[in-house]
Image (spheres, rainbow, N blue to C red):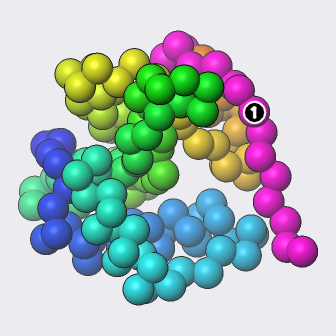
């Protein structure tokens, strides 16, 4: 598996992964995919996104935003999507470690990871804890 920065050429395969992720983890939240918004978001995150590639096919995506911590001016990388095709899930940690190394090279010492509570949350929390992450807050989503 090769891990490399995301490119515009990855767009179509990345969108396929995002659709898979939405169907698997976000459907119950009423998420609607807008192709124009996805293109805009993809363009915005391109410089801070990474793809996992096997035999020329994109099988994983990790994209986020670099900003500043809400309590200081220290940089933080906030994950927007991290998704691996089911067949390649066991390689997802390699993609995460690649992004963590990329952040360290740029002096980014904090990373925020997301967790959907309908996706084996207890198992993922233990996994994040083993990597040195701590739960900070839980967000709730609802239609109003």
* As drawn, 64 above or below 27: above
Q: Quadrant of residue 31?
A: bottom right
Residue drawn at x 41%, y 86% as measured from the top left: 36
The quadrant the N terminus occupies is top left
- At label 1, counting other C-alpha atoms closer than 10 Å, the crowd grade (few under 14, some 14-19, many 20 or more) is few
Residue 139: in magenta span = yes
* As drawn, 86 above or below 126: below
Q: Quadrant of residue 43?
A: bottom left
Q: Residue furthest left?
A: 56
Q: Which portion, as a residue range, is magenta? A: 130-144
Left or right: residue 136 versus residue 33 is: right
The quadrant the C terminus occupies is bottom right
Q: Residue furthest front?
A: 73
Residue drawn at x 54%, y 36% as measured from the top left: 113
Left or right: residue 76 versus residue 58 is: right
Q: Residue 118: x percent and y percent?
A: 73, 52
Residue 55 in view here: yes
Residue 133: in magenta span = yes
Residue drawn at x 73%, y 76% as measured from the top left: 30
* As drawn, 137 above or below 129: below
Q: Residue 131: x percent and y percent?
A: 49, 17
Main SS, magenta residues: loop
* As drawn, 11 above or below 140: below
Left or right: residue 10 versus residue 84 is: left
SS assignment at label 1: loop
Q: Residue 55: x percent and y percent?
A: 10, 57
Q: Residue 137: x percent and y percent?
A: 75, 33
**Residue designated by label 1:** 137
Left or right: residue 128 versus residue 91 is: right
Residue 127 in view here: no
Residue drawn at x 42%, y 75% as measured from the top left: 38
């Amino acid at each position: 598996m090769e891990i490399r920065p995301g490119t515009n050429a990855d767009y179509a395969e990345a969108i396929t992964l995002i659709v898979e992720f939405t169907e698997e983890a976000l459907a119950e939240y009423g998420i609607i995919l807008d192709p124009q918004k996805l293109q805009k978001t993809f363009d915005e995150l391109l410089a801070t996104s990474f793809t996992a590639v096997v035999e020329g096919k994109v099988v994983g995506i990790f994209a986020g935003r670099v900003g500043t911590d809400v309590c200081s001016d220290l940089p933080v990388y906030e994950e927007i999507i991290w998704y691996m095709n089911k067949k390649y899930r066991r390689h997802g940690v390699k993609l995460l470690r690649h992004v963590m190394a990329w952040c360290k090279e740029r002096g980014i010492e904090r990373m925020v990871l997301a967790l959907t509570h309908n996706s084996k949350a207890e198992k993922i929390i233990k996994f994040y804890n083993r990597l040195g992450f701590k739960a900070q807050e839980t967000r709730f989503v609802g239609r109003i």
